[in-house]
Image (cartoon, rainbow, N blue to C red):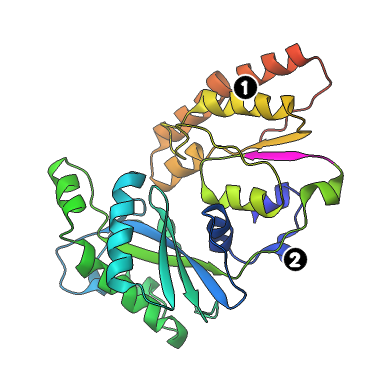
């Protein structure tokens, strides 16, 4: 909702949930009777016998790579997918489940990054409409805990992606075009599907930046250079979204959060300011 509001799309009017916007970015053609859910690959403790007693260790499974997560999602699709539900691979730990004839009336589907270090039981929705989704989350643990990808990650000292976590439900988004509302051409530069989905839904330019990850290892310079390229192609406004400070906060990494902000100062702003000065037009930069 914050990003939609910054781009002047009133969330009270246009927000239909975050996962459908991510679905748009993944190229998923949602039907009106379909519901999308964010499908995180997470790390749960393994000592407990019951799913409800496990503790969520990491909402991102140690920032699992997209290539590794893709293997997990494909396994889940083979084991849990059917004619009514389908799993789609996104970026890193962020993926999508689309359910035909699904609902958003689910009670509280808690975001996993809000409950790091806590026992999951009290955060599992008890609403009757959520029962099938919660059952899928529990089944995913049985499917993924001994997956070859996770065995390899554990051997390398990394956290396994041993469960999915479903949340962020919503229906197909409908946004007016950015240019029709404001008479200017806009671009969105981001590593994450949520922001790309907002841009695509508003018919904005959404270029890909090689090496953009959504974490502190992202391609800071590449995003800045891409912004200048978009301006040279006729964009009037370029919205650069850098997830790293937020992601480091979710991971309880204050030093990395500070460093991510410093890297924006060091690697993004100089390229943009010097490039705008060379272009020679009037400009404004707003940093949020």
Is-magenta flag for residue 186?
A: yes
Residue at x-position 77% and y-position 52%:
177
Among the 4 quarters of the image, the one containing residue 275: top right
Relative placement, left or right, of 138 versus 276 is left
Pick whichever, 278 or 230, lies toward us.
230
Does the image show residue 140?
yes
Residue 237 drawn above or below residue 154: above
Residue at x-position 85% and y-position 46%:
182
Question: Label 2 neighbourhood size at 10 Å, few (<14), some (14-19), many (20+)?
Answer: few
Pick whichever, 77 or 22, lies toward us.
77
- Residue at which label 2 appears: 13
Residue 230 drawn above or below residue 163: above
In magenta, the rendered stretch is: 184-188
Where residue 27 sits in the image (x, y, percent)? 54, 55
Question: Label 1 neighbourhood size at 10 Å, few (<14), some (14-19), many (20+)?
Answer: some
Among the 4 quarters of the image, the one containing residue 39: bottom left
Label 2, secondary structure: give it: helix
Quadrant where the C terminus sits is top right
Numbered mark located on residue 232 in the image: none
Residue at x-position 73% and y-position 47%:
7
- Residue at which label 1 appears: 269
């Amino acid at each position: 909702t914050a990003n939609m509001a910054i781009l002047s799309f009133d969330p009270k009017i246009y927000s239909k949930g975050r996962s459908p916007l991510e679905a748009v970015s993944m190229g998923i053609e949602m039907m009106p009777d379909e519901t999308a859910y964010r499908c995180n690959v997470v790390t749960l403790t393994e000592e407990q016998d019951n799913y409800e007693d496990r503790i969520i260790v990491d909402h991102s499974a140690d920032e699992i790579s997209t290539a590794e997560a893709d293997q997990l999602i494909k396994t889940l699709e083979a084991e849990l997918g059917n004619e009514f539900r389908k799993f789609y691979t996104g970026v890193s730990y962020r993926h999508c489940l689309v359910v035909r004839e699904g609902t958003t009336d689910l009670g509280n589907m808690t975001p996993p990054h809000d409950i790091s270090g806590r026992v999951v039981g009290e955060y599992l929705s008890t609403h009757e409409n959520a029962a099938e989704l919660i059952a899928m989350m529990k089944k995913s643990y049985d499917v993924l805990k001994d997956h070859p990808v996770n065995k390899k990650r554990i051997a390398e000292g990394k956290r396994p992606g041993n469960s999915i976590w479903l949340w962020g439900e919503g229906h197909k988004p409908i946004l007016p075009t950015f240019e029709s509302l404001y008479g200017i051409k806009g671009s969105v530069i981001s590593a994450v599907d949520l922001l790309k989905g907002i841009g695509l839904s508003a018919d904005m330019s959404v270029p890909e930046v090689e090496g953009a990850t959504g974490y502190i290892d992202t391609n800071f310079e590449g995003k800045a250079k891409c912004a200048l390229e978009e301006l040279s192609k006729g964009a009037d406004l370029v919205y650069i979204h850098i997830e790293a400070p937020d992601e480091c906060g979710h991971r309880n990494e204050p030093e990395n959060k500070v460093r991510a902000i410093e890297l924006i100062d060091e690697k993004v702003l100089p390229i943009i300011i010097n490039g705008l000065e060379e272009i020679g037009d009037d400009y404004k930069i707003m940093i949020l």
